Image (cartoon, rainbow, N blue to C red):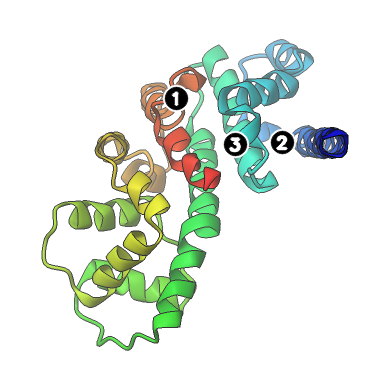
Amino acid sequence: MKNLESENKILKKKLSIAQAWMKREILSNLNGINVSKVNFETSKSKKSFFSENVEEIVYNQVYNFFGEELFMYFSKDILENIISGEILFFALNQNKAVDGLGIIISYNKSFDLFVEENITKLFRKYFNSKKYKFNLENDLIEKKLHSVVYKGHILGFGNLFGILKKISENKDFSPYLSSFKDFLEKYFYIGNILLEKDFLEIYKKLVDLETFGSKRHIGKVDFEDVFKTRKYFLGDFKDKNCFLYKLLKILEF
């Protein structure tokens, strides 16, 4: 019993050291955030913004929202993008005329990184283990999944939604889509989250906003767009019934 308690203390100490190291590294990187993304009306407001120790405030906000268990599984790149987006949102709140594109890009990158690390890589491995050989049909989803498997393309925000929507509707499955459905059944802990009704409803709201799609590609996102996206994507860092928090539950398995 004493040995177990001693081991737990050692593990907690190591975890604490690792978290402190990650925090220092992330905050150090964020100190070099591209200030050109943050436009202020006066140099005084810019000076005030960076004197408020925003990086530290936002880091703690993200940590407190996701909690220690989820937080410890984050990759540094995902964390940096989430925190970077929130720092830019902090600036946007001070000047609502600022273009919110940088925030959306940060959100999108955090999504892309997470899906690639925790879903797409696993799907490629699963697909290749089955030694599937399909004829490529003239279908957008089939072409996308083919590119994901054979060309290493990412599974983007809109593409993943289209795939999940078709699977959830139990429509006729073409070969690549069928293989992705089989993958979700095998890795049920991923499938249960991605195909959950509430998750798909939130996902649809984000897709309908078009901030991760056409508005991002046009290159102009206003405050209202960002406000709604942040609400559904991050729950305003208050509501855990939000897109990213639900998605990250995959890490618990």
Give the alpha-carbon distance from disc 2 to disc 3, as whole Å: 25 Å
Amino acid residing under circle 1: Lys
Sequence-wise first label, 2 or 1: 2
Residue plotted at (24% across, 68% down): 140
Q: Quadrant of residue 246?
A: top left
Q: Which residue is mark 3?
A: 70
Residue bearing the label numbered 2: 33
Question: Which class describes the residues within 10 Å of circle 1: few (<14), some (14-19), or many (20+)?
Answer: some
User: Is 151 rendered above or below residue 22?
Assistant: below
Residue most extreme to the front: 1
Query: Hey, what amino acid is under mark 3?
Result: Leu
Residue bearing mark 1? 240
Disc marking residue 21 = none
The span from disc 2 to disc 1 (Cα, nearest Å) is 27 Å
Q: Nearer the viewer, mark 2 or mark 3?
A: 3
Q: Nearer the viewer, mark 2 or mark 1?
A: 1
In x, y percent, where is residue 223?
A: 42, 22
Res. 224 in view: yes
Left or right, 12 with reference to 131: right
At x 41%, y 51%, the residue is: 189
Q: Name the residue nearer the viewer: 119 or 224.
A: 119
